Image: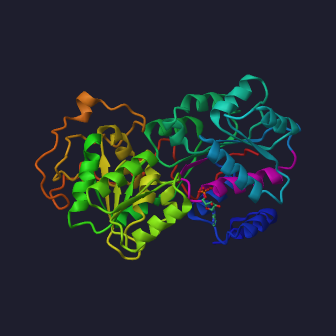
Amino acid sequence: MTFSELNLIEPLLQALQEEGYTSPTPIQEQAIPPVLNGDDILGCAQTGTGKTAAFSLPLLQRLHEAGPSHPAKAIRALILTPTRELALQIGDSIKAYGRYTNIKHTVVFGGVGQVPQVEQIRRGVDILVATPGRLLDLMNQGLLSLKYIETFILDEADRMLDMGFIHDVRKVIAQIPANRQTLLFSATMPQEIQKLSASILREPVYVEVTPVSSTAEKIAQKVFFVEKTYKRALLKHLLKGDDIERALVFSRTKHGADRIAKELSKAGISAQSIHGDKAQSTRVKALTQFKNNELKALVATDIAARGIDVDDLTHVINVDLPNEPETYVHRIGRTGRAGAEGMALSFCDDTELPYLRDIERLTKQTIPVEEEQPYHAEYSKLPLGGGKATDKINRSGGGGQNRGPRNAGQGGGGNRRPNQRPAGSQSKDNSPAGSSNNRNSSRNRGRR
Ligand code: AMP
């Protein structure tokens, strides 16, 4: 399929050509026609799928075709997104895609002075990209009005929930006219987001794309329940065994990466750490040693690991679980490339159980627990449904008791706990209330 087959107008096609986009991504194919048609959308998609263009292109087209705003300088579209980085990225995309239209936009977010943002709004913008806190702040000061919003886009709704913004989001929505087009995007659909969608969307078209999680299917995964204090001991135990020739080890912090590398070296396991505080030359050297098989372990933070591309990497070890499930997928995607056997081993302490639950929810897989290891702690996984990443762990109930280190056996091969819940139980059978599940809807409810 091509962008012109999606009936996009020439000014957008021209910009897309200059961006080097040759064909639409699946989410764009699915979302652009109904958005152009004025339908509401419930989109299950995450960053990296091309979702920004999926909503920005038809939005720009509708505004362009509608002509100048009435009254003049009224804000006609609002895009609400949880973080400043996302807000800026969306702003950049709109600028790029809309360069041959006369649609104006601006971005507002907290942590910086509001004066330039307010100035922009005063001069008149068609599209406002905002984070919830700053937006409410400006609204409360009477510096902007949402009275003329025709299209409202809620991006990364589940992250809004995780970050505690959902009340602010509801307050914002209360100020937008009910007779609007609403697009809601979320990588996952926890219950609270389903409830929100049901209350703000009208007969939405449901669009979904396979998440990045699909890569995870090719990689064998295990999780090790272990108390934080024993994580480095467990790592040494695994790396001393014969199963692992070479491993990329992830640590959440730079300090942690250094400590791990130091402790491994002391134990006679060749290791180096790489992270943002290390000079580029030191990083390159460590990476070269790792590629040449001179290091058994390279310990990296997520940022530093970005450029690492080692073809026959067999093991990725997560000493800390990332709080963003997508990061887990990116991390483990470093192994199992070019036909290599891939194995991802993750350590999980009791504070990380919510992250594990989020990862299983995103990847729609249950990761088996490796109990045959000397530092096994008896935790119970959190149920997949409902809740959010910031849930407190009920240590007396759900957390379980740690038995402390067992006699060291051979890690790696042992029994696996049977899967506790069928993978995929989060899938379409769980589709949110109010979703029509109708991809080919051509309803026109006569809005604009
Ligand atoms: P997003 O999911 O919106 O964050 O987009 C992910 C990346 O894909 C961005 O860098 C976009 O510039 C890029 N992208 C979006 N749509 C396309 C497309 N149709 N062809 C090529 N790249 C695209």
Residue at (81% x, 63% y) in the render: 11
Q: Can residue 227 be seen in this view?
A: no
Kindly give the residue lying farthest to the bottom in the view shown.
339
Give coordinates of residue 144: x percent, y percent. Answer: 78, 30
Left or right: residue 385 versus residue 208 is: left
Where is residue 239? Give x, y as percent: 26, 60
What stretch of residues is rendered in magenta? Answer: 41-68
139 or 441, which is in the foreground?
Answer: 139
- Quarter that holds the N terminus: bottom right
Residue in front for this viewpoint, 419 or 254: 254
Residue depicted at 85% across the width and 42% down the height: 69
The reply to whether residue 320 is visible in this rendering is yes
Q: Position of residue 190 (x, y in %)?
A: 44, 41
Q: Can you give x and y, in whole percent of width and height, for residue 317 in the image?
A: 34, 57
**Residue sitting at the far top:** 141
| Number of numbered discs visible in the structure rendering | 0
Quarter residue 36 falls in: bottom right
> Where, by quadrant of the figure, is residue 292 drawn?
bottom left
Q: Is residue 58 magenta?
A: yes
Q: Residue at x 83, y 60 (%)?
A: 100
Quadrant of the image where one finds ligand 1? bottom right
Which residue does the image show at 37% across and 76% down from the upper left?
Answer: 339
The one of 423 and 305 positioned closer to us in this rendering: 305
